[in-house]
Amino acid sequence: MKLFRHLNLILIGVGLVVGYFAFKESKLLQRTKPVPQEISIADLVADGAGDNLYVRLGDDWVTDGQWVEISSGRRRRTKTTYVGVLSQTSEKGRRLVEAIDRGEDGANASRFDMLLRFRKTSADEVGRELDRGAFEGVVISELESLDSDVIEVFVENGGPNVPEDILVVEVGRKPKSWTFVWSMFGFGGLSVAIGAFRLVLQRQRAKLAAAAQPQEDGDGVGLPPSQ
């Protein structure tokens, strides 16, 4: 069976992938605490998240409705949505609030204070999350750079030119426990070790089998293997 023949490489590949995600989670854990810090968007933009990237944001934000949706994975079913928001206390945020109060849409803000990232499957789910007002999540922009596709789509849709270093909070994400992370490291290491051991053993058996086969002379007569 073709899958069985490649089982060793699959085990090694799975182990490496699990180890990679465990490494990413360990980096996050080093900069978070079990309890989120409560912080306003204005303070987060001005001062950063400090030593705890796990945050609880209040409802002191406003959006003009600009967002982009990025599809990935098999059959493009994995949806990641980025929503641009402004602090209500910033100059542009106050202007947007005033425009909304006057019944204007206030669209096409020239910049955002930050982006909210949602890993949801539909726009309706994102809308329900936004209606809640307050969010918990992780400031992922401290750990990874913003995908260039996100910047391009915002511009293509007539939005602002989003800087690569803009703050991004992944809503709903929570840091895992160290127990979980070490379990991932253990599983990944074990998978790589088993796959590598089986691969070496398989090659050794192939060599022994080749050495045990009878040799042939020039006339095609089988000769016993040399001692």
Image (spheres, rainbow, N blue to C red):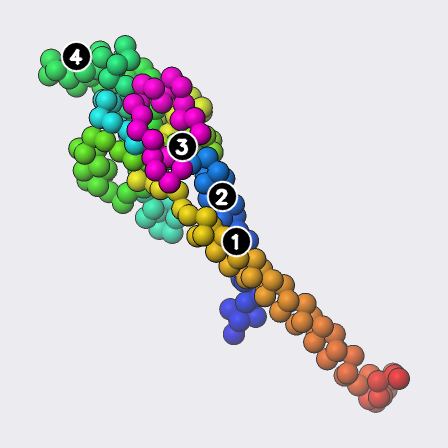
Determine which quarter of the picture holds residue 132: top left
Secondary structure, mark 2, is helix
Q: Pick the residue in front: 168 or 152.
A: 168
Q: Give the label on residue 185, or none.
A: 1
Q: Tell me which label, 2 or 3, sits earlier in the chain.
A: 2
| Relative vertical location of residue 21 with respect to residue 81 in this rendering, above or below | below
Residue 44 sits inside the magenta stretch: yes
What crowding class fits label 4: few (fewer than 14 Cα within 10 Å), some (14-19), or many (20 or more)?
Answer: few
Residue type pointed to by label 1? Phe
Residue 173 rendering spot, x and y as whole percentages? 34, 41
Residue type pointed to by label 4? Glu
**Quick one: quadrant of the C terminus?**
bottom right
Seen at 53% across and 57% down, the residue is 186
Cβ atoms under marks 1 and 2 closer than 8 Å = yes
What crowding class fits label 1: few (fewer than 14 Cα within 10 Å), some (14-19), or many (20 or more)?
Answer: many
What's the CA distance linking mark 2 and mark 4? 43 Å
